[in-house]
Structure formats: structure tokens, C-alpha cells
Image (tube, rainbow, N blue to C red):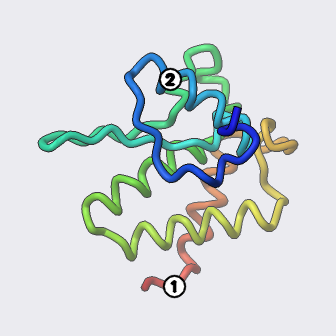
Amino acid sequence: MQLVLKPSQFDVLLLPNLYGDIVSDLCAGLVGGLGLVPSANLSDDVAVFEAVHGTAPDIAGRQIANPTALLLSAVLMLRHLDENETATRVVEALRDVLTAGSVRTRDLGGTASTMEFADAVSGRMDTVAAG
């Protein structure tokens, strides 16, 4: 209950896989949906970065997926690899596109396709200063 009422009081939740899956889906609703939530699975030797929603086979190939979760997963990977300047540029470009609001996918109330949104972020990356 506290996770829904006061989510900011938690920094980290450590859960077994099944409960982690359930709680991550619940928390995605707190921030706007599964299309926005990245994930990182880390061990001492291996790191896997993916969107919380996984492959979303029900919408695969239809150009309606929000690529934000995958972009933010890439940011987590870049930070894990100490590529912080590039990670910051991706975050800033993504923030700029979302803040402008003219290019949004359906889950965010827009009409942009997956590629239109990704192209907008990529185009903004060209103008975001490194560093």
C-alpha cells in the first residue's frame, strides 16, 4: 500500500523474479505506463538491459510501441559502461521531445508511430551538446 501512496520513500526494492515482475508492472502505472519503464538485471559478471514490458509481442511490427522504455534501458546500459556523456545526451534529447509534446506515441495521447518518435529523439540528439 505504501508503494502506491508514497512511492518516493523507496530507493530500491529487492524482490524475487515473480514479485519483481508484478511490482514493476504496478509501478509502471504510477509513471504513465509500461512504455516508459526501463530495467536492468545485474550480477557480478553479466548485465542485461531491457524494457520492463519485454518484447510486447501483441503489438510487434505495428509501429505503435513507445520506444522510451528501450531508450531509457540503453541509458542504464551506457551508465553501467561509464558512457555518461552519451547517456546524458540521450536523456536530454528524450526529455526535450517529451516536453515539446508535438511528437508522442498513442500511449501518451499522441499519434506518432514508434519510428516517428525515435526519429524525433534521434534528430534532437544531433543538437544536444555533449558533456
Q: Residues within 10 Å of mark 1 (few under 14, many from 20)?
A: few
Residue sitting at the far front: 2
Relative vertical location of residue 1 with respect to residue 92 in this rendering, above or below: above
Q: Position of residue 92 (x, y in %)?
A: 59, 71
Q: Amino acid at mark 1?
A: Ala
Residue matched to label 1? 129
Relative vertical location of residue 98 with respect to residue 5 in this rendering, above or below: below
- The residue lying toward the viewer, choosing from 19 and 121, is 19
Quadrant in which the N terminus appears:
top right
Distance from the alpha carbon under mark 2 to that under mark 1: 36 Å
Quadrant in which the C terminus appears:
bottom left
Image quarter for residue 85?
bottom left
Residue matched to label 2? 21
Residue at x-position 45% and y-position 41%: 39
Q: In screen coordinates, is 88 left or right of 81?
A: right
- The residue lying toward the viewer, choosing from 128 and 107, is 107
Residue at x-position 64% and y-position 54%: 8
Q: Residues within 10 Å of mark 2 (few under 14, many from 20)?
A: some
Q: Amino acid at mark 2?
A: Asp
Image quarter for residue 124?
bottom right
Residue at x-position 71% and y-position 45%: 31
Q: Position of residue 79 (x, y in %)?
A: 34, 62
Relative vertical location of residue 128 with respect to residue 17 in this rendering, above or below: below
- The residue lying toward the viewer, choosing from 96 and 1, is 1
